[in-house]
Amino acid sequence: MGNSLVSIQIIPKTQNGEDVIPYVDEAISIIKQSGVKFEVHPLETTMEGELSELFHVIEKMNKRMIEIGSTNVISQIKVLYQPEGIEMETLTEKYRP
C-alpha cells in the first residue's frame, strides 16, 4: 500500500494532428514498466504508490511523449495523498460486482 493515488490524463500534441492513441498506449506502457499498481479507465489512468515514485513515472511519460514526436504535452493530474496509506479498492469496493 502506498501513500497516494494519482490519476493522470496525458494529452500529447502531435506534429501533424495524428491520432494520439499510439502516444497514450506508449504512456501506459511506461506505467506498466514502472511496476506500480494501476487501472486504466476511459478518460484517465489511476496509479497507486508512493507520491514521489508516481511523480517520477509521470515525468518519464512526459519526456517519452517528446522523444516519440509530440511537440508538447498536457498532463491533467489528480492526487489523493494520505500519509497513513491508501488503496484504490478502499474507494471503489462498494461499486464492484
Image (spheres, rainbow, N blue to C red):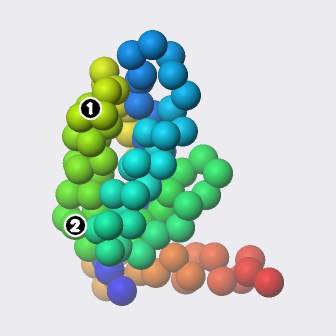
Q: Is residue 5 visible?
A: no
Q: Residues within 10 Å of mark 1 (few under 14, many from 20)?
A: some
Which residue is located at x 39 percent, y 49 percent? 27
Residue topped by disc 2: 53
- The picture places residue 37, in percent across and down from the top left corner, at 41, 75
Vertical position of residue 91 compared to residue 1: above or below = above
Which residue type does callout 1 highlight?
Ile
Quarter of the image that includes the N terminus: bottom left
* Secondary structure state at the residue bearing disc 2: helix
Q: Residue furthest right?
A: 97
The quarter of the picture where residue 52 lies is: bottom left
Vertical position of residue 89 compared to residue 13: above or below = below
Q: CA distance from mark 2 to mark 1?
A: 21 Å
Which one is earlier in the sequence, the residue at label 2 or at label 1? Answer: 2
Q: Is residue 32 left or right of residue 96?
A: left
- The picture places residue 30, in percent across and down from the top left corner, at 33, 57
Quarter of the image that includes the C terminus: bottom right
Vertical position of residue 95 compared to residue 39: above or below = below
Q: Nearer the viewer, mark 2 or mark 1?
A: 1
Q: Residues within 10 Å of mark 2 (few under 14, many from 20)?
A: some
Most foreground residue, 86 or 66 = 66
Residue topped by disc 1: 66
Which residue is located at x 46 percent, y 81 percent? 87
Q: Is residue 25 visible?
A: yes
CB under 8 Å between discs 2 and 1: no
Which residue is located at x 40 percent, y 48 percent? 26
